[in-house]
Image (spheres, rainbow, N blue to C red):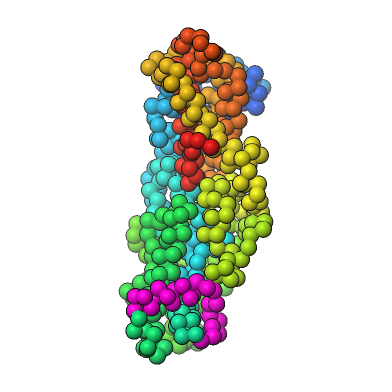
Amino acid sequence: MTPEELSAAISACLSQAVAAGEIAVEVPDTVRVERPKSREHGDWSTNIALQLGKKASMAPRDFAAMLVRRLSEVEGIGGVEIAGPGFLNITLDTAAAGELARTIVEAGDHFGHNQALTGHVVNMEFVSANPTGPLHIGHTRWAALGDAIARVLRASGAQVTSEYYINDAGNQMNVFARSVYNRMHGLPVPEGGYPGEYIKELADIVLAQAPELAEQDEETALPKLRELAYTAQLADIKSTLADFGVNFDVFFSESALHDGGAVADAVARLREQGHIFDLEGAVWLRTTDFGDDKDRVLIRANGEPTYFAADAAYYLSKKDRGFSEKIYLLGADHHGYVNRLKAIAACAGDDKEANIEVLIGQLISVNGAKLSKRAGNIIELRDLINWIGADALRYSLARYPADSPIALDPEQLKKNTNDNPVFYVQYAHARSFGASANAQAKGVTRESFDASLLTDPSENELLAVLGQFPSVVAGAAQSREPHRIARYLEQVAGAYHSWYAATRVTPLGDGPVEEVHHTRLWLNDATTQVLANGLSLLGVSAPERM
């Protein structure tokens, strides 16, 4: 019996009591069950009697006593006790608890998926680095966390589109192009330009595709050079993200907003909503009406749109594309964007609390990291991947809440020891995978299963931890906190290692294969499945050997 099945059983008992006239309350859609702090208090606990007792005009303990009578008749429940002011401590019978192993194995990759966010249509924008240079350490955290959040949301039933906003409009792209042109001709870096060696690499790529640019003056060469250099740099960004296991559904061009008239259209639409005013020749959006610290200029007095105008057009684009929820993941230096983005949502007629969410990530540092030889003044993501490894980097970044600063120790992350969390979890997966292969080589199979044989205390503990996975995933999705999954996987690994030490999946020596060995193989493989599913949600591999 899974926690979800137990929750459903409690709900059914409540509904039966309402139908029988024993109580008059509205039965909640979901009854929360939790693991008690002490296993002496049973397998699961619920405070539903405390929640509903007063609403039913009953003392919570009397309400609990009514539930005990009904729950005691539910198949799979071994016992129910009332504790304290009305808590219910529930113990499953051994067979019902052990049946979870078969449930997990048969569910396979789908185990842990839930419907907590079914019906939610979400656009998630993250990373969105300027296409003027390689991805660096500042983009690393959101690449890992953003992708993990998207995966967890999908596993909880949400329809998610991950999106990268390409800031390919404005003067920065001209400066970028001039930097490549100057490097191509052996000229100094232009004022405010880009000095890295990657600019020389881009110049070589551009010349290979369009050698005639070498003979053209800057004004003539720049339009084509800018497009070719931009395309090459964006390809490098996509390649680095792919190496990091991050693949976006959509790459959205800022310049397309301008070229397609979306910025002008956004200004017109917001004016119709009544939130625009004109002052000193400029066009303003009255964002202070919705919590911003000052009103924002959309169109300057010279007729040029601001970056904020593009932000407004981009938000409206997301709305027009059917995304009822827009999640923005921004860096630590973007706190000032929160209120202005929410104000855009409100000006557009959306609920700024329900239709937009802005997450701010804190800085990370990596001990001993060196500046990129290619870029000169940054630490490249590609260098970090080559140095630390994508798995260790992604797991470590997903292991902490976004709003907590992180200092990573690469030497620690490369150690094959139990105090390295990513190794600890991956090793548990490899160990369980190997245990399964060894068992099958000795004639242990999953052809039979008797859940009542899983009586060792370590088996009860492992099953209880495995059963929490769907609720952990749902909680991580609703809170946008994939670190909950990482910490949970470490609990699974610990419970598995304890079980592995306490029991045997294969017979000792030349002993005969017994029913308990077949049954334990199911539990072993259930653990393998949960570890693999959890690592997948973090974008981390589940190795078969370590």
Q: Horizontally, is 360 left or right of 12 in the view? A: right
> Which residue is depicted at the point 38% across and 27% down?
106
For the residue pair 61 and 94, the one nearer the viewer reads as 94
Question: Residue 317 in the image: x percent, y percent?
Answer: 37, 65
Residue 207 painted magenta: yes
For the residue pair 95 and 423, the one nearer the viewer reads as 423
Answer with the quarter of the image where residue 53 lies. top right
For the residue pair 249 and 91, the one nearer the viewer reads as 249
Question: Residue 272 in the image: x percent, y percent?
Answer: 38, 72
> Which residue is depicted at the point 43% across and 21% down?
440
> Which residue is depicted at the point 54% across and 69% down?
374
Question: Residue 531 in the image: x percent, y percent?
Answer: 50, 35
Q: Which residues are magenta?
A: 187-210
Residue 546 painted magenta: no
Q: Is residue 96 above or below residue 471?
A: above
Q: How many marks?
A: 0
The residue most toward the front is 510
Answer with the quarter of the image where residue 114 lies. top left
Question: Residue 196 in the image: x percent, y percent?
Answer: 54, 74
Q: Is residue 384 above or below residue 79?
A: below
The residue most toward the left is 260
Residue 283 in view (yes/no): no
Q: Is residue 59 above or below residue 280?
A: above
For the residue pair 285 and 480, the one nearer the viewer reads as 480
> Which residue is depicted at the point 61% across and 46% down?
414
Q: Is residue 481 above or below residue 205?
A: above
Residue 230 in view (yes/no): yes
